[in-house]
Amino acid sequence: MRRSSQKAKYKPHYKLRLTLRRMFLENLGLKVLSVTIATLLWIYVASEEKTEISIQVPVRFVNMPSDLAVVGDVPSTLSVLVSGPKTLVFGLMNRDMEYKVDMEGAKPGLMEVRVEPDALGIRSPLRVVRISPSAFMVKVDRIVEVKMKVQARITGEPHEHYTVSSVTTKPPEVKLRGPSSVLSEIKALYTREVDISGFSHDTENVVSLDLSRYPGVIAVPKKVKVIVKVSEKYVRKSLEVLVDVKAVVGKARVVPPRIKVSLLGPISKIDSLTPDAVNVYIDLEGEGPGKYRRRAVIEIPKEFTLLDARPAWFDIYVSPGGGRVR
């Protein structure tokens, strides 16, 4: 009985020795090789030539409240000067590094950000020599929404015989969402340019809104339809037309014998307009010989508009004899 209890007493110590032996002696060759390689690498790195290099580390704001935004000029990158063994220093250039600014709990207004070197994750034997800027100010603004009318921006000129009659957008207004201080600067919201050079017909284009000068502003919708309507140019033309007399028995003489009319019409048809296309007459139906003072009736093609006619009154002298003068 005493012998078995003695064996039970020393059994835990036996297991501990067995575990330690396995830890150090199992795969002994592989472990010795690993330690040797690590030692050689440490010796190589420790003895390697030291150098300095400047790297650009992007700045990213995280945990930003959904109703707030950073506005104004803030550094997009930090210039970090690092010193250490050449191999490790140049190895930093292949790492995706960034400096995170935690905005949890931020409030509207100005806040100072002090750059903490430890947050860069650069460890010994590397050393951060300098960070620029080491601190910067951040302006935090509240996000708001407004509605604003859209104005289309067009460039170029239509065909020489055409002119722009109207420019509209669909929808006529959009919703803007962004920092309140930025939205207050927007006095007019324009589209990207639409080139109508040489156009002789109406056109519709889906165009983005020009928000390039307003960082942090989002439009809903992002694009609108710009509708440009063109119409043929109307030009003025003056003609001298002989005044006729209708429904009269005898010889009629009109003083003055001609009328000068000014017409407005499409440029494509006005050049071909001749005095023969305009009918000017005085109706003396039922009247006998004598002197009369009348206005003339002026008939023009439907495509044209009468702007002016002079003189307004005519003297007509009708003498007996002859036939009806037309």
Image: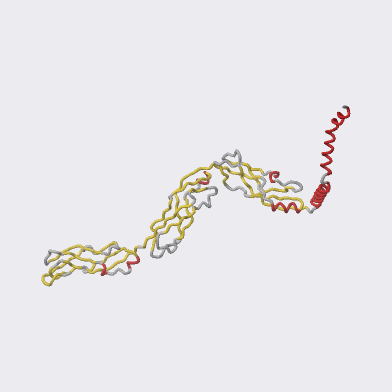
Q: Identify the residue at the far top of this view.
A: 1
Q: Identify the residue at the far right of this view.
A: 3
Q: How many marks?
A: 0
On the rendered structure, is 199 left or right of 266?
right
Vertical relation: 16 (above or below) 156: above
Residue 181, image x and y in percent? 53, 44
Q: Identify the residue at the far front of this view.
A: 1
Name which residue lies at 69% across and 48% down: 131
Vertical relation: 247 (above or below) 136: below
On the rendered structure, is 171 left or right of 302?
right
- Which of the image's four quarters has the C terminus? bottom left
- Which of the image's four quarters has the N terminus? top right
Name which residue lies at 72% across and 50% down: 82
Residue 260, image x and y in percent? 26, 66
Name which residue lies at 53% across and 44% down: 179
Residue 32, image x and y in percent? 83, 48
Name the image colouring.
secondary structure
Toward which corner of the image does residue 162 lie, by quadrant?
bottom left
On the rendered structure, is 296 left or right of 287?
right
Vertical relation: 267 (above or below) 19: below
Judging depth in this view, the residue of 214 and 251 nearest the camera is: 214
Residue 142, image x and y in percent? 54, 41
Name which residue lies at 11% across and 66% down: 288
